[in-house]
Amino acid sequence: MSDDRITDNGSEPVDLMLAREIRDLDRGIQPIRDLWPGIERKIEAHPQRRRAEAMATWMPWGVAASLLMAISALTLTLVRENPLTTQPVSFDRSMDEMRAEYIRVRNPLVQEFEKTNQNLDPETLEDLYRNIEIMEQARREIEDQVRKDPENRRLVEMLMKIHAQELDLLKRDYTRPTHSM
C-alpha cells in the first residue's frame, strides 16, 4: 500500500515536517497585537448550541416516531390475538387510537406551555394561541383527508409533520431570549 500523504521531495510527509518546524519555533515570539478581542467576538457571534436545545429539536420527531410505532404494534397485536377473524382492524379505529395517543401526549404539553408562558404580554400570547389554533385546524383537516384516502403516504407524512410541529411549538419557552445567527 502506498502512503497518500504529500511528501517534500519524497523524504518525509509535509505534516511531520510542519510539526517539527512549529515545535522548533522560539516560544518567546509574541503577536503584533492582542488577538483575544477578535477571537471573543467570533465566539460570541456563533454561540454553541446547548445539548438541551439539540434534544428539543429532535423531540417532536421522536414523539411522532413513537406514535407511529405504537399504532403499528397495536395493529399487529390485535391481528395476532384474533387470527381466526378475517376482518382486520379498521383504519378508522387505528386513526382514532393514534389521535387519542397524540392528544394524551399533547395535553400535558399544553398545560406546561400555559404555565411557562403566562407572563408574556397579551399580544404575544394571542399570537401564540392563534398559531396553535391554526395548527390544530390543519391537523384536523389532514386527519379528515387521511381518513378519505388512507393509501396516500404524503398525507400521512404531513399528519406526522404537523404533529411534530405542534408539539415543538408547545414545548418552547417564549419567555427566554433566543439566539439567532
Image (cartoon, rainbow, N blue to C red):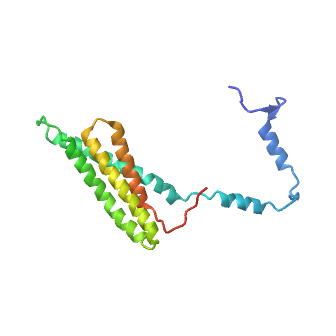
The location of residue 60, given as percent across then percent down, is: 41, 53
The location of residue 87, given as percent across then percent down, is: 13, 36
Q: Quadrant of the N terminus?
A: top right
**Image quadrant of residue 172?**
bottom left
Q: In this view, does 162 lie to the left or right of 70?
A: right
Residue sticking out furthest to the top:
1
Residue sticking out furthest to the left:
84
The location of residue 144, given as percent across then percent down, is: 27, 45
For residue 34, above or below residue 72:
below
Tell me if residue 72 can be seen. Answer: no
The location of residue 3, given as percent across then percent down, is: 72, 29
Q: In which quarter of the image is the C terminus?
A: bottom right
Which residue lies at the image location 72% right of the left edge and 62% below the top edge?
Answer: 40
Tell me if residue 101 can be seen. Answer: yes
Which residue lies at the image location 87% right of the left edge and 51% below the top edge?
Answer: 25
Which residue lies at the image location 32% right of the left edge and 46% below the top edge?
Answer: 142
**Image quadrant of residue 155?**
top left
Q: Is residue 32 left or right of residue 178?
A: right
Which residue lies at the image location 73% right of the left edge and 33% below the top edge?
Answer: 5
In this view, the residue in front, 126 or 23, is: 126
Count the labels in the image. Answer: 0
**Image quadrant of residue 59?**
bottom left
For residue 40, above or below residue 165:
below
Q: Is residue 68 left or right of residue 86?
A: right
